[in-house]
Image (tube, coloured by chain):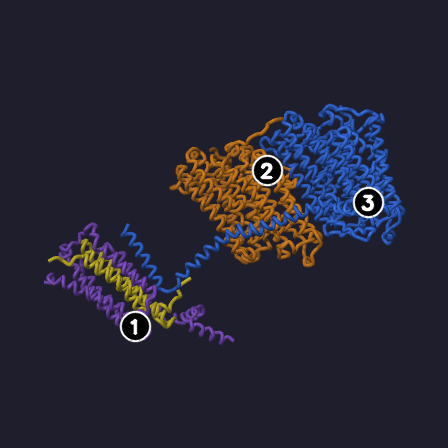
Amino acid sequence: MQDVPTTWFLLLGAILFTIGAVGVLVRRNILVMLMCIELMMNAVNLTFVALGRELGSLTGQVVVFFTIVVAAVEVTVGLAILIELNRLYQTADVDEVAGLKG
Amino acid sequence: MIEMIQHPLFWLVAVIAVLSASGVVLSRNAIYSALSLLANFIMLAALYLMLNAQFIAIVQVVVYADAVVVLFVFVEMLLGAVGRIPVVERLTPHLIVALVVGFLIMVIVGSVVYEVPIGGARGSATQQAINQAGQVQVLGMTLFTDYLLAVELAGVLMLVGLVGALVLTHQWRRERGIRVQRANREGMPSASAGANRSSLTGNRS
Amino acid sequence: MMTEQLYFPLLSLLIGLPALVALLLALLPRERHDLLRGVALGGTLVVFGLSLLVWFLFRPGAAGFQFEEDMLWVAGLGIHYHLGVDGISLPLVVLTTLLMVLAVLSSWRAIQEGVKAYLVLMLLLETGMLGVFLALDLFLFYVFWEGSLIPMALLIGRWGSERRVYAAIKFLLFTLAGSVLMLVAAIVLYLWGGNTSDLPQLLRTLPGQLPFALQSWLFIAFAIAFAVKVPLFPLHTWLPAAHVEAPTAGSVILAGVLLKMGAYGYLRFCIPLFPEVVPYAVPWLSILALIGIIYGSLVALAQEDIKSLVAYSSVAHMGFIVLGIFALNSQAMAGAVLQMVNHGLSTGGLFLLVGVLYERLHTRRMSDFGGMWARVPIFGSFFIIAALSSAGLPGMNGFVGEFTILLGTFHVNIAYAAVASFGIVLAAWYLLTAVRRTLFGPARQGNGSLTDMTAREILVMLPIVILFFVIGLFPNWFFEKINPAVEVLAVQSPAPQVHVQLGK
Amino acid sequence: MLHSIWLVIAAPLAGVLLNGLLGRHLGRAFVGLVGVGSVGVSFVVGALALIELGALPAAERSIGVGMWDWITIGSLQVGMTLRADALSLWMVLVVSGVSLLIHLYSVGYMGHEDERMFARFFAYLNLFVASMLLLVLADNYLLLYAGWELVGVCSYLLIGFWFHKGDEEQAPVVLVDGSQVAVPPNLNPPDSGKKAFIVTRFGDFGFALGVFLIWSTFGTLNFTDVFAAAPQVPTATITAITLLLFMGAIGKSAQLPLSVWLPDAMAGPTPVSALIHAATMVTAGVYMVARNHVLYDLAPTSSLVVAIVGAVTALYAATIALVQVDLKRVLAYSTISQLGYMFLAVGVGAYAAGMFHLTTHAFFKALLFLAAGSVMHALHDVIDIRRMGGLRRKMPVTWLTFLVGALALAGFPLTAGFFSKDEILLKAFEFSPWLWAVGLLTALVTALYTFRALIVAFWGQPRDWPLYEKAHESPPIMTAPLAILAILALLGGLLGLPIVFGVPNWLSEWLAPIFAAHAPAEKHMLSVTTEWLLLGISAAVALVGIALAYWLYAQRGDITARLTVTLRPIFVLLINKYYLDDIYNAVFARGGQRLAALLAQGLDKAAIDGIVDGGARLFVRGGAWLTQFEDGHIPHYALGMFVGALVLVAYLVLR
């Protein structure tokens, strides 16, 4: 019996990534947007690990390890910003937050 | 034995992962989103196990499913009702473009993944080599030799993130934050801003 | 090439000293205005003295560069730190150092805010300008060229009058747009010239190397960069804006030195580097210069703002200089070099005088002046003398320059000379109109409190006026140094047609 | 003294420096002394040099005095070199002599100015003398041009000397039928000076081109070299050169069509009008043509143009002088007319006659102006002859001297003007009877207008009694120069008596080495009878003119008045100076201003700067337009990011 083909993992990664991307784009809740970003990251992580196995390289896993570290930090800081933002605008709706312009 | 059910298991996990991911996007309540996210993370951990990446699978559970999701839920609790924002109210151009872009991403990435053979040099970390030394040990050796600097930097990054989060949410920021908020409101054409301004002028006069 | 008997790096010192003084100024306390001014004045005086030393040590009658300094600057790229002075740059160097002394002196009272920054910028500007005139390496030249741009823009932008920021940005953008083209052309030359940007080396290696079409493009790129600076019609509109808004000393330096950088560029780079293209370019540039002469004069006539009038007169005068340069014979070219000095002195003098007036009346509108000669006789005399010098009165500097330019041009093309000569009539018209509206007529009510020029202001004008007459009466002191340098160019370029050669 | 001829220029220049820089601290007496003394030195040096030159053999009477090399560029070599020869030294003597007298007169005339203005006046006047002497002594065209321009500047400064004065309105002429004819106002001094400078500079534009053409043709600017090489040059080139040089003369000597500046130049102080705008500077054109007679002889066309312009101008200006109400303007038009005579002379090749008339004209016209100045001095600057009358009783010296000047101007037999004018007419007749006829007609008109002015101003009864009561004779420092000039105007004719008198024509012989050396062989001599006849006709015309004036203006004023009504259109035309000023004003002055305004506003501001600023605005607008995509909505940014990523990936995949 063969292992599950790497391509399937990659396809799954692609699907998850797309779902995350669409989520980031359509949701207005900043919290959910952050979650969707995590989804996308995980999709990428999956791709790394799958390819790492295919190529017999540990580098994929090493990268994922760092990605997870970065993701954790990102979430921490992101949520902190979210709290601060909430303090300023009393909302988590991105449509209400439009200060980032020239 | 596990080899036997590998395929059905993959399909099961994959379907759950996609469903839970969709749940993250589609749930009106952010708590449900967070819970869906948790499910998704665990499914991914399972996939990592299937890919023979035990260490990553454990880290996935510990960091993501544990810490990150807990953080999300925590913040959701902290913010309370503000988390309830409808998923889609109406069909805006933005929404259409977003969906088209998403679709295109899937088509392009999917077709590439499907069509293009995986090339590149094969590494030395074959199944046998890993099995001999043990998965975590090999990874650890790699991390603390070849990627030592990166590991150290990752540590520094976490420290900076920690301090950053603390600074951002710390109490003394609040005073200034309100001032910034006032200033921002001054320039913002919203009803509340207008009220704010009038109160300010009222104070002055 | 044999170096001079002096192994002392005189030119480097000349360039570096203002920058060093600027550094010293930066270290001094900002409240001690008079100390700062004194140090700056002392510095510019020493630099002026050094340039005089160069002037008197310069051997007349010899072509080629003197006081050369050459060392590899960016070794990997073959870029040299190559300095040298010849008969074309020497008068301009001395003019620069002299005008800097006068500029510092003239802003003694006019600048009261940000004195330190002002003086530091002035001295950096001096370094930049001297570098432009002394650099013999394309990239070194470019560095100084751009380097002189920034202090000037800042001087206009900070110490100018109402629309100073507009003027400063306009000045900066115009010149930058031009010099970007020059940079590209310089890089192409560098690549074609065997990876060197050293001007004498390029002049040895380039002839015959460049295809004609490429030469033409390079010429155009250089010509546009210099045309902006000169400025030639229709690239001149930054000039009135910059002049009108700049502080007095800024206007003096702008008219006196910065405009010369463009004309100098034509002589130093355009003509020797692209000898094959030059004959084809002559009609274009000459006609632009002629348009500049007539157009500048007429527009000057219509100005209400006296500074604007002097600014447009610069367009006309610089037209004469470019016309002379592209007559390509030694008379017109030597005349053009001398005229650069003349224009620097007479227009610089006019700007100084307008500044004197502005300090007292805070207006530049000529309808606010009138009948001043009775009230301020010293000012009036200086103003008339400067205007007449600018109008080319014999016995003064402007005459010698204009006459030799026109004489040389006439030899090459009668029509050009005829049109340009008509410009002299127009020059008399607008300058005398300025004199008429400023000094003559019944005295105006509001100008009752007007005081005449102070001793310091007279001291500023005196060297200029003395030079008017010295150059007008003894121009050979200058020509003996200028002639060899321009004769080389006149020989390199196609010789003018001689109609009938008789007599003697 | 010949080799120190530079002293002639240096002395007045020293006066300029002294009076110009320190004048206001020195006191009037000292300033006057410096002014007069320095010109006196010039005169003495000039006279000594002339005597010294006369002692030399005729062939050697040309001395070049080099001072320093002025401009040397390759083949262009111009020296600060003066040339002392019969012509230039004669001019030196005339210029410095007349200047000396006028300086002396000015001490009195300008006495009421404050010290600063007094010193300034003498500085200018000395500068003028130096420039004029440089002009006549120049050894090359460039130096000549330099002097030429410098005298123009002095003229500019001196015309505008009273720079605060405004336009002077003139009372309209009331005719006997009650109708009025408006008289154009007198232009204010500063604008007059400006006008003079610019109009003459227009002529100098041609002069400069002529100098360029000379260098381009001959490769040298020295008179001697040019004259030596001239015969080998094609006539067309010489014609071009001479016509261009004549353009300068037209401007400087106020000939048609550039004559408009001279009447307005009368806005300057009267000694200036006498010195610059009658005796010396305006004759520079004549001197220039005489100096270049070698070239003009080679270009008959140019000579003809010179003669015709001269003749036409002579008549044109004389007719205008007939109706002027301003005494100085009568004299100004008379000057233009007499300059026309001189050009007629040099145009027909009678250079010595031209120089002779130049000399006598300097005497009698300076005299007339100074006398007019004396009148102005007495009447507190009133110059309108309609307010004078009967002045001969109050100002006997002025009256007598003015009479002498008028007789000379009118060509009364045996006065200086008679002989010099007659010589010109004689030579004109030789050349072409038509030109002679024009000259004769002009002579008649000249006698008429001269005595009209004289009679109206000095004869009859005072018309403005209060003014008359205040009138007084001028102080001796003013009347002494008048007397000397009157003697010269009477006896100046002795310098060049007609050949038919059987005595040598001294001036003609003195100048012979200059003019005869290159002159073509005499064409034909008139018979003695014809000469006597012509002389008689000239004398008769002068007498008839004077008599007619007496009859018209002193005896039968009623006829004149009715005549004016009958000939009203002509009268209006003349009083408006043939409308030449108005045409120039409309076309050049106002047209130029309008063109300038159009270029400044329309082309420079709107078009060129519009393009520049428009380009800048385009970028600003573009930026503003682009910022609308940067609306601050994070999902929009995110979408942009995704689209960008998508495009990049698509590019990489589909490449």
User: Are discs 2 and 1 both within one chain?
Assistant: no
Query: Relative to D218, is C76 on the left or the right?
Result: left
Query: Relative to A62, is D601 on the left or the right?
Result: right
Q: Can residue C35 be seen here?
A: yes
The residue labelled by disc 2 is C417
The residue labelled by disc 3 is D372
Q: Position of residue B93 (x, y in %)?
A: 34, 64
Q: Say whether marks 2 and 1 touch (CB < 8 Å).
A: no
> Circle 1 — which element?
helix
| Colour representing chain B | purple
| Colour representing chain A | yellow
The N terminus of chain D is located in which quarter?
A: top right
Chain letter, orange in picture: C
Query: Relative to D236, is D394 on the left or the right?
Result: right
Q: Position of residue C427 (x, y in %)?
A: 63, 44
Marks 1 and 3, how far apart at CA? 110 Å
**Numbered mark located on residue B76 in the image:** 1
Q: Quadrant of residue D98?
A: top right
Q: Say whether marks 2 and 3 touch (CB < 8 Å).
A: no
Q: Can residue D30 be seen here?
A: no
Marks 2 and 1, how far apart at CA? 86 Å
**Numbered mark located on residue A25 in the image:** none
Identify residue type, mark 3. Ala
Q: Position of residue A80 (x, y in %)?
A: 33, 68
